[in-house]
């Protein structure tokens, strides 16, 4: 995981990913997908306070949808007490209504969590992740792959 002192020249999205944090979802509603991802993060010992994190995620969605278009959503929460950022991924093959900016159903979800006091690193994560998912071929592959390893490996070197 990235260290407390952030060096953008060494930055890699891949370093924030973990095989255990990939979920293939069949949940019917946005909040159920969000809850499933939060449950996964809790099981994998990423969260300090599951309820506070889930509440922060839902509050962020109330402010403005994290559905950025292209079938992608990036729900996120930054809270005090975290040392590192983490990214959980959900693949939803059928798509789920998300109130995305383009009106499309969301099929790929990247949930980001981490410290509230490292804005530069957070913006770098969002920027690099957005650049990676603008690649239509990568998005298509994510929806076709069947293993966590294959999903994570799409981000190797990014």
Image (cartoon, helix red, strand yellow):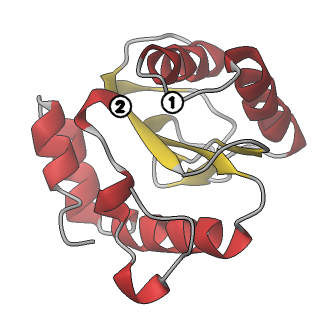
Residue 92: tell me if it is visible: no
- Look at 80% across and 32% down and name the residue there: 56
SS of the residue at dot 1? Answer: loop
Other residues around mark 2 within 10 Å, as few (<14) / some (14–19) / many (≥20): many
Residue 26 lies, in percent from the top left, at 38, 12
135 w.r.t. 34: above or below: below
Q: Nearer the viewer, mark 2 or mark 1?
A: 1
> How packed is label 1: few (under 14 Cα within 10 Å), some, or many (20 or more)?
many
Indicate the quadrant containing the N terminus: top left, top right, bottom left or bottom right.
bottom left
Residue 69 shown left or right of residue 55 in the figure: left
Residue 10 seen from this side? yes
Which residue is identified by label 2? 21
Report the residue at 19% width, 43% height from top.
Answer: 151
Quadrant of the image occupied by residue 144: top left
Front residue of 2 and 132: 2
* Numbered marks: total: 2
Q: Is residue 69 left or right of residue 14?
A: right
Residue at image position (44%, 18%) is: 40
Disc 2, disc 1: CB below 8 Å?
A: yes
Alpha-carbon span between mark 2 and mark 1: 10 Å
Compared with 3, 69 (above or below) is: above
Image location of residue 153, percent across then percent down: 14, 53
The relative height of residue 22 versus residue 60 in the rendered view (above or below) is: above
The image shows residue 153, relative to residue 128, as above or below, that is: above
Which structural element holds mark 2? helix
Residue behind mark 1: 46
């Amino acid at each position: 995981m990235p260290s407390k002192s952030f060096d953008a020249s060494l930055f890699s999205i891949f370093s924030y990913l973990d095989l255990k944090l990939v979920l293939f979802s069949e949940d019917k509603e946005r909040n159920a997908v969000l809850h499933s991802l939060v449950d996964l993060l809790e099981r994998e010992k990423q969260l300090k306070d599951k309820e506070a994190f889930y509440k922060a995620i839902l509050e962020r969605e109330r402010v403005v949808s994290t559905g950025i278009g292209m079938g992608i959503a990036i729900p996120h929460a930054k809270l005090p007490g975290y040392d590192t950022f983490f990214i959980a991924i959900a693949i939803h093959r059928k798509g789920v209504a998300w109130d995305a900016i383009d009106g499309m159903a969301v099929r790929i979800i990247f949930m980001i969590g981490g410290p509230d006091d490292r804005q530069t690193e957070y913006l770098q994560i969002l920027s690099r992740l957005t650049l990676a998912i603008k690649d239509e071929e990568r998005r298509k592959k994510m929806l076709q792959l069947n293993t966590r390893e294959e999903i994570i490996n799409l981000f190797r070197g990014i």
